[in-house]
Amino acid sequence: MSEQSSAATPQSNLAKVFASGAFAVTGELGPPKGADPEVIREKAKLLKGFVDAVNITDNQTAVVRMSSIAAAALSHQAGVEPIVQMTCRDRNRLAIEADLLGAWALGLRNLLCLSGDHQTFGNHKDSKNVWDIDSIQLVKMMEDMRSKGIFINGEELEGEPPDFFLGAVENPFADPLHYRPFRVAKKVRAGAKFLQTQCIYNMDKFKDFMSKLGDMGVLDDIHIMAGLSPLKGPGMAKYMRDMVPGMDVPDEVVERMTGAGQGIEDKAERSKAWRAEGIKYCIEQIQEVREIPGVRGVHVMAIEWEEAVKPIVEGAGLLPRPQAIGSAASA
Amino acid sequence: MIVAEQKPLEEIKGVLGDAENVLVAGCGTCVTVCLAGGEKEAQLMASALRIASRVDGTPIEATDVTVQRQCEWEYLEMIEAEVEKADLIVSLACGIGVQTFARHFPDKWVVPGLNTTFLGQPEEQGIWTEQCQACGNCMLAMTGGICPVARCSKQVQNGPCGGSEHGLCEVKRIRRVDGVPVMVKGRGGRMMPATEDVECAWHLIHDRLKEHNRLDLITGVQEPKDWTTSRDGGPRRIVREDLILMDEE
Ligand code: SF4
Ligand code: SF4
């Protein structure tokens, strides 16, 4: 595992949590469809102290929102360490490098590299996409910048190079299934140090995926974070099962959520029961993934449900977090 | 081959201005094969323009002519007489033909009658699919003869991405018939374009490499693509010294 370099520059809190051997917890903070910084501060309040870092999404599902880097800087000021998400959909290699130099200068330390959702999923369907490089090449580009101090064109950059703690994602449930662990190995080779997975509902398949990674010998080189998304009710479970590509939601999960609301007439009460079940199920999942060799943390995606993070993390016995925020915040 | 489809007649009528003598020029190569702009289509287009103009009450003369290839000077030279008589040309060639036409006859106004759509292959009778984007740096040797530039929705170089499911891409294509999106009732009763499934190019690549025992080709991290040979390097040009005719002085 590569060390974060210079002693003078504040390090990633998330990297320190991993280095300490603690089981890491990350969350998700979606920037607003507007320019109000208060939205970020409010969400940060709900997450502060309960996670080691939060993903700040980059025009998620191709819907335009406040820029990931700007929102990350606000989150950072609010005392919640951000993980800047960077997709390859909207920027070419020049723009990505420039923006990430800026992100580092603003004190942001974690970077998650993704290819990005296609613009046809979002609200700017007639836009033109970029995809000059892909997510794996993005990891490699930033690893070379970090370790060799060079841009993607081979030119040296001025001064201390950004030393982002580099992350990637993988969907253990996408096809061709058997190829997924190889793709993780590729990301490790490119320079990824942590990896968040797609939301897990099919635990058996996830265990298979992890054991293949173990067989391939890559688990010592990357911190795998199991992606978990608490369900708000059977509707959400069904939607994920039927509508979201690359998502594997077994029928038992839908049934379990349906069962939680059975016999409850009052709408509000039923919704409360569903949510309680969703939180309970998520806590059980955390306990289950903790037992899987190689899982070094969880990424809790409580989408537009930040309030759920505290009871989940608390219920899983993961509080208090090792350190609220590293030296990065006080810098 | 180059695949194209005809523009709606209304659109073509809209760019005729006050031309009285219109020449519809077909092309005998790619667009003949894809049944968009060959001799037959040129004849039909000319007669459609004549009839429409009469119905509209401003009759025009519309004739047609077809050459073997509109993208080469030699063929255009053969129709100088017909072009001379016309005050506007509707070219039913691909975009290359239209431009060659306009350059060869600088005094004439040339408008396109087709939308040049892609470099593709006839899949089955009446259906064509895109296969190549002429990136200028062919990587098919690595991908088993399946193009990730033209056929992967995200032009991923190290695929397949996490959206690949049952051999299909997460991106759906807007369903078009004769160039026009097919509209269906969506959620909430609003009309929206229907979509159809697209194969995941990387799933196809993966399966083909596996079959040939060549998955080793994609285990390494594929280097970023050099796009200077693509559109991104500006209009491209090929110079073949060995073929250039020397002045004999
Ligand atoms: S790699 Fe480039 S040249 Fe080769 S088929 Fe694809 S787009 Fe065409
Ligand atoms: S699903 Fe396949 S074709 Fe679609 S973007 Fe991903 S890799 Fe490309």
Image (cartoon, rainbow, N blue to C red):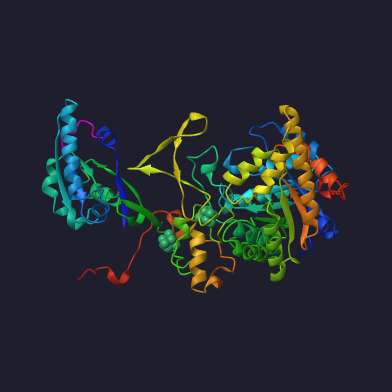
Residue A172 vs A37, above or below: the answer is below
At 43% from the left and 35% from the top, the residue drawn is: B184
Q: Is residue B128 magenta?
A: no
Task: Please provide percent x and percent y for residue B52.
Answer: 19, 32
The front one of B97 and B38 is: B38
Direction bottom: furthest residue: B213
Relative height, residue A176 to residue A47 (above, below) = below
For image coordinates 46% across by 69% down, the residue present is B141
Residue B181 sits in quarter = top left
Name the quadrant of the C terminus of chain B.
Answer: bottom left
Identify the image quadrant of residue A196: bottom right
> Is residue A61 or residue A253 the one in the foreground?
A253
Residue at position x 49%, y 45% from top?
A: A128
Percent x, y for residue A112? Answer: 68, 52
Instruction: Say which quadrant the N terminus of chain B sits in.
Output: bottom left
Residue B19 among magenta residues: yes
A153 relative to A104 in the view: left or right: left
Image: magenta residue range: B15-22
Principal SS element in the magenta part?
loop
Looking at this view, is A159 or B72 the one in front? Answer: B72
Ligand 1 visible in quadrant: bottom left
Most distant residue in the top direction: B57
Q: Is residue A162 visible?
A: no
Q: Taking the image as drawn, is residue B111 in sight?
A: yes
